Image (tube, rainbow, N blue to C red):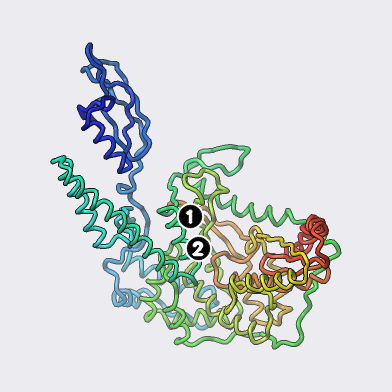
Amino acid sequence: MGDFNLDIRSEEFYARKLVNELLALGIKQYIKDFTRITKSSQTVIDLVFSNDKQNVQVCHTPIITDHAWIVMTFEKSNDCDKLRKFRARDRSKFSADYFERIWRKKYSKLGEEETVDVKANKLIGSIVETLDIVAPMKNFNIPNRWMDQKWYTDEVKEITKARDEAYKRAVQSNREEDWEQYRLYRNQGVAMIRNKKKAYYEVMIDSNKNNPSEMWKTLKEVINGKRIQNDKYDEIIFDETEGKVSYNREEIANRFNEYYITSIKDIVLSIDSSDNGGLTDVQEELTDINRWEEFNTITEEELRNIIHKLPKKKGTDEGISTEVLQEIYNVINGDLLKVINASLSEGIFPEEWKVATVVPIPKVPKTVKASEYRPINVLPIYEKVLELVVKKQLDEFIASNNILIEQQSGFRKGHSCETAIQTVIEQWKITISEKKMVGVIFMDLKGAFETIDKDRLIEKLKNYGMGGKVLSWFKSYVNGRYQKVKLVGVFSKQMVVEYGVPQGSVLGPVLFILYINDIVEHKKRVKQGDSSDYRERYRAEESDKNEVSRTYVRRPFTIQRTLRLYN
């Protein structure tokens, strides 16, 4: 922005060259009106160039010089200048030895007669107290520069540096050979960045095929160029009828928590369980399986293997991340083992470990609608360790008793979306070869995990052969859960979670497929077809597309009555 002394309204060579060269770089000139008016001339020599759309005005009053005022209104949005703020533990002086020295002074050993809750609270409380000394919580500011991207290699850095230097030479000399050199470096730089990005993301996608969480992060980065963020929560619409309302951060956090809890409750209450169309829960207690009454306690070696295979996670607000837990493991291993084995032996899940932290993440940029914030459930790392111990034994029980139906492909070793798709395609091929019609209804169950009926889930686990301390443990695990919302460092009040299994948990997916495992039993009651993985297939007996259409008009109501059995 400034007085370039080149009239872009004229056909002057240098004026046209300036505009065209910058336009080739994606930089546009926004002044259209005359900026200097004299008796003998009217020229546009005060210019504004930008690579983003700008709101500019040319004002000729008040007159100070013979140049007009250029008024430019813009909202600064420069990612290179932004700092990403977060709170974490300062590990600059942290070491396992330092932790152990303080731990020995602060920690009192677990008593054999203490309850599971007392043991768990004492252990985690002592870990946090020690970490607060050796690695205290601290506010950090990290520059959000694009240069931090992993595809920005030394090669890219060198070519961009050469490009910038060539540009400076070309601008100063204005010789065609210098401009040609600049264009050469520019094109090489663009090609190299594209290739580096492509190679980097191909590796990321390929290496995260079996890690859905990291896969989605990578895909979002590819699509959006950067993660969708929103740190402006001053005005959020929770109810369309009340419009946009201003709150302080704590009030907004509380409103978000209420919104998420109420949304699930509304889904559950919207299902009329009194009208099942004559359908009943057909699952009966299985008699030809081995009953599971007690967990096996684990060894220190088994616990060590679980800890060291944990994926990298930050954990909840007490600051016990995967990395921290792995580094202090040799200090706390004996007591952590005692807490886990006490939980298994007594059939009790620690109460304080049941609190989830929910982080609202915007699905779209700069949204103010609460409905466009996805709730991300964050559970304590140590809680997941206990879940992993139980899941291993649960998987063995399910496999040894052949409990899961053949049609189930979700959350199952050796199965995937590919196997599910391949199965139905083969079925469709057979149907089509028999000159019959195939109609398909695809369904997405809203709040599938969160709307599970806890009492019905426990009853089903009992019917699958679980009892004693095992069934007591699962009752303790699903009941008495709470959640709080974290919003830009501010926490809401805790609220009771009445329904469902926890999102983001280790056991949640397995419990969900056990919950819906008997859904195909209802195909005898539902005229034709079978259901699995949120899918209902109808196979017409005759190749009459009109009959298929008529059946599919009626079909959703029958399916809806079937699904009421699961809520």
- Residue under the point 56% across and 42% down: 237
- Check contact, mark 1 vs mark 2: CB within 8 A: yes
Q: Say which mark, if any, is on residue 486.
A: 1
Question: Which part of the image, by quadrant, shows the N terminus?
Answer: top left
Which one is in front, 276 or 56? 56
Q: Nearer the viewer, residue 281 or 91?
A: 281
Q: Is residue 479 left or right of residue 125?
A: right
Residue 402 vertical position relative to residue 324 in the rendered view, above or below: below
Residue at image location 52% in from the left, 86% down from the top: 298
User: x%, y% of residue 284?
Assistant: 79, 77
Residue 276 on image: x %, y %: 82, 61
CA–CA distance between discs 1 and 2? 10 Å
Residue 543 visible at all: yes
Amino acid on which disc 1 is placed? Lys
Mark 2 Cα-neighbour bin, 10 Å: few <14, some 14–19, many ≥20: many
Is 550 above or below relative to 309? Answer: above
Q: Single out the residue that lies furthest toward the right.
A: 278
Is residue 273 at all visible to an observer of this figure?
Answer: no
Where residue 327 sits, quadrant-wise, is bottom left
Q: Is residue 418 left or right of residue 227?
A: right
Three-letter amino acid code of the residue under disc 2: Val
The image quarter containing residue 438 is bottom right
- Name the residue carrying label 2: 378
